[in-house]
Image (cartoon, helix red, strand yellow):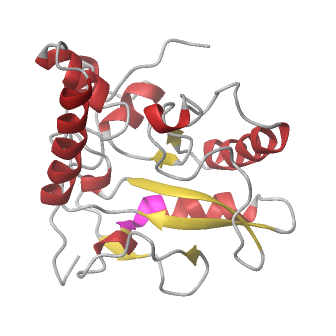
Amino acid sequence: MNEIVLMADPKVAAIPVAECGERLVDVRRGGSLLVDVRKQDPADAFAYLREGVLERLLKAQAMLPQGMRLLFVEGYRPPSLQRKYFEEYASQLRADHPGWPAEQIHAAASRYVSPPDIAPHSAGAAVDLTLADTAGRELDLGTRMNADPEESAGACYTHALNISEEARANRKVLGAVLTAAGLVNYPTEWWHWSFGDRYWALTTGETTALYGPKELTPRS
């Protein structure tokens, strides 16, 4: 397995952002994607993505084998909510590992929640998703979505070995279509894919990111 670059790695933060100004759009419009509401928030922010990311998701879905569909769970996440998630998980790790220095806590937390200053979700660049059948029933991808490394014994890692053959095959299908559409995976989370953010730029060799943190407004 190739070495995993975590979101907390200075190489990610060093990527400059050349904000393209692309708007956030509601992925529910048109009804092309199956949308799960488990991460729905009062502002419905979860259902928004940058236009370019949504276009690529629709391309990926068109490449899926018959009987499979993408199941969208969460896209945009306001910076304040991202900060809350990161701090909660970091606090959990501090409680579980009182001897760890702050740098180790920060890096370990970034396996599961992106640091707020570089979070792809807060740029509208990232999506958490899985596979479903045409009736909307989730397929087996090895863990529940958003399972952390401790809970899943590392099975949340995209290339984990401690999952079933069926789950491995489904992850391969999901990865193949999303990669072909131009998205990149965060390898500690099989469900997390992005386009246009700093992590995408580092992974693909681009010199700048297209999307930076953004606030959701009525005109987005």
Residue 143 versus residue 68 in the image, above or below: above
Location of the C terminus by quadrant is bottom left
The x, y position of residue 159, in whole percent, is 64, 28
From the viewer's perspective, tell me whether residue 134 is left or right of residue 74.
right
Picture residue at 29% right of the left edge, 76% below the top: 41
Secondary structure mostly seen in the magenta stretch = helix
Q: What is the tally of numbered marks visible in this picture?
A: 0
Q: Is residue 174 visible?
A: yes
Camera sees residue 18: no
Residue 15, by quadrant, is top left
Asked where in the image residue 57 lies, by quadrant, the reply is bottom right
Residue for point 48% across, 86% down? 29
Where is 126 relative to 151, above or below? Answer: below
Quadrant where the image shows the N terminus: top right
Q: Residue at x 85, y 59 (%)?
A: 65
5 or 201, nearer to the observer:
5
Report if residue 68 lies within the magenta region. no
Where residue 95 appears, as percent x and y from the top left, is 19, 30
Outermost residue, bottom direction? 30
Residue 199: % across, % down: 36, 33
Q: In the image, is residue 171 above or below residue 128?
A: above
Based on the displayed image, in which of its 4 quarters is residue 56 positioned? Answer: bottom right
In the picture, measured across the screen, residue 72 lies left or right of residue 92, that is: right
Q: Where is residue 106 shown, x and y percent of the image?
A: 20, 25
Residue 204 placement, left or right of 117: right
What is the magenta range?
49-53
The residue drawn where x is 30% and y is 31% is 110
Q: Which residue is at the front of the view, 15 or 207?
A: 15
